[in-house]
């Protein structure tokens, strides 16, 4: 009886939390529609501070920041929304608008045909998606191989034999892409510059040489951390050190 009562209390507590978050979300949307963008931002952030996140909250929060010309935060939250729903065209379009407002123009190093193709294939699905495809292919291989073993007609046996191994081969590729996507997600860390202007140093200290400048909204890859400094890499291959307070990691 005590256990059941405890479960009911937990359920009601969770339900109340979701209800309050939905109420806060609707209030934030109302503030946004009234062009009270800073108040809307505070309301959206209160949902995140409560441990609840969603693409909608991040997207609306980014829109509110964009309305206030907070380019860095708007890009940051569009990116956060895109990580949850990678195929959302509205998020992609608004992110592109925000990126057009940035100052830095960084040329991307062109990829080779093979590496570019592998990257495109890898990004077709997340690692969970590739893992599911691999499992389905293995099941398909087993079914086709059993049918091959029980088939009597030689033409059917040839077709089932070839088909089963093709499905298995695709499943092996799925495992490869799943591991590749997983390694990319876990070992690659990006960040958005939040400072209006920051100087990138050659070493992680204020006395080192200034090598270039970056501005609010630029996306960088974080490769190393030393004390209060982050080592970053740009899409054009440039590297340097930046104070950790001048960026926010995704």
Image (cartoon, rainbow, N blue to C red):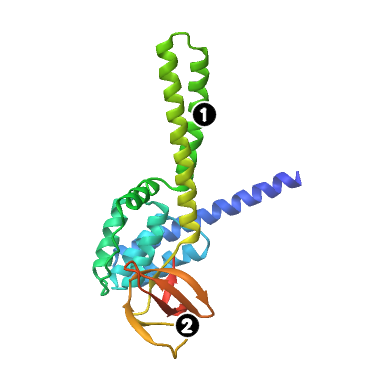
Q: Is residue 115 above or below residue 106?
A: above
**What x and y, as percent, mark residue 199?**
36, 83
Where is the C terminus found, in terms of image quarters? bottom left
Residue 107 on image: x %, y %: 26, 67
Is residue 17 shown above or below 196?
A: above
The residue at 48%/11% (across/down) is 151
User: Does dot 1 land on a helix, a strand or a loop?
Assistant: helix
Placement of the N terminus among the 4 image quadrants: top right
> Eyeballing the image, is 48 above or below 210?
above
In the rendered structure, the answer to whether residue 197 lies left or right of residue 6 reads left
| Viewer can see residue 111 | yes
Query: Of the numbered discs in the image, which one, if any, rests on residue 204?
Result: 2
Of residues 21 and 220, which is closer to you in this image?
220
- What is the spatial separation of the Cα atoms under label 2 and label 1, in whole angstroms? 52 Å
Q: Quadrant of residue 190?
A: bottom left
Residue at the farthest top position: 152
Q: Which residue is mark 1?
A: 139
């Amino acid at each position: 009886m005590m256990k059941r009562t405890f479960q009911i209390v937990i359920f009601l507590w969770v339900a109340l939390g979701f209800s309050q978050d939905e109420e806060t979300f609707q209030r934030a949307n109302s503030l946004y529609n009234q062009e009270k963008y800073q108040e809307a931002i505070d309301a959206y952030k209160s949902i995140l501070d409560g441990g609840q996140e969603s693409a909608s909250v991040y997207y609306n929060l980014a829109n509110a920041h964009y309305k206030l010309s907070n380019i860095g935060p708007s890009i940051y939250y569009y990116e956060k929304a895109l990580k949850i729903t990678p195929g959302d065209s509205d998020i992609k379009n608004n992110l592109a608008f925000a990126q057009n407002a940035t100052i830095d123009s960084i040329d991307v190093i062109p990829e080779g045909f093979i590496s570019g193709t592998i990257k495109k294939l890898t990004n077709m699905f997340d690692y969970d998606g590739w893992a599911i495809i691999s499992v389905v292919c293995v099941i398909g291989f087993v079914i086709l191989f059993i049918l091959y073993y029980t088939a009597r007609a030689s033409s059917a046996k040839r077709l089932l034999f070839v088909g089963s191994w093709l499905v298995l081969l695709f499943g092996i590729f799925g495992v490869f892409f799943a591991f590749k996507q997983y390694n990319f997600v876990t070992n690659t860390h990006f960040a958005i510059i939040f400072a209006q202007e920051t100087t990138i140093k050659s070493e992680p200290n204020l006395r080192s040489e200034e090598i270039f400048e970056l501005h609010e909204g630029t996306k960088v890859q974080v490769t190393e951390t030393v004390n209060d400094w982050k080592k970053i890499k740009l899409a054009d291959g440039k590297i340097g050190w930046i104070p950790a307070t001048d960026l926010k990691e995704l």
